[in-house]
Image (cartoon, grey):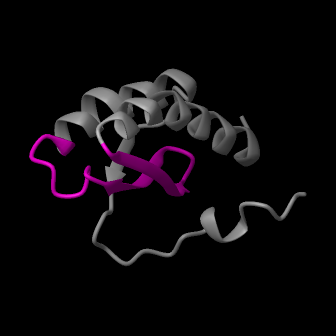
Amino acid sequence: MNDTELKAAVEAGLEEIRPFLQRDGGDIELVTITDGTDVKVRLLGTCVGCHVNQMTLKSGVELTVKKHAPQIKTVVDISGMTEKEEYRDHIDTDR
């Protein structure tokens, strides 16, 4: 899977889980994929500071992303951290 296909697969996983997060007032965005195996996301809305967000991240988000992109090893939330955002900065450059 090339970088473009991997990004699309990860985004598909996030799109699958997004309605469950939004139902509770939260959301999620892809920040970056490193080395084709490590995903950084940012939890948004009520997900930030929620006492169960790590459980949601591991048992919901990570499993769903891995279903779409099996080579992914980790999914990490970087809410509240400053991080270079490769993908968000280039989202619509192919259009």
* Left or right, residue 92 beside residue 77: right
Image height check: is 35 above or below 20?
below
Identity of the residue drawn at 72% across and 61% down: 91
Residue occupying the point 25% across, 52% down: 46
Left or right: where 36 falls relative to 8 = left
Residue 37 belongs to magenta span: yes
Which quarter of the picture shows residue 25? top left
Near-viewer residue (32 or 53):
53
Image mark count: 0
Which residue does the image show at 48% across and 53% down from the upper left?
29
Of residues 71 and 88, the one drawn nearer to the viewer in this rendering: 88
- The residue furthest right is 95
The magenta segment is 25-53
The answer to whether any part of residue 3 appears in the image is yes
Q: Is residue 69 left or right of residue 79?
A: right
Figure check: 22 above or below 34: above
> Looking at the image, which is closer to me, 69 or 8?
8
x, y percent for residue 8? 68, 39
Residue 50 shown in magenta: yes
Residue 22: x %, y % from top left: 39, 39
Q: Image quadrant for the N terminus?
A: top right
Q: Where in the figure is residue 3, as x and y percent of width and height?
A: 71, 47
Q: Is residue 39 visible?
A: no
Provide residue 71's location: percent of width, then percent of height: 52, 32
User: In what quadrant of the picture does the C terminus appear?
Assistant: bottom right
Residue 18 as seen in the image, left or right of residue 50: right
Query: Which one is nearer the viewer's eye here, 80 or 33?
Result: 80
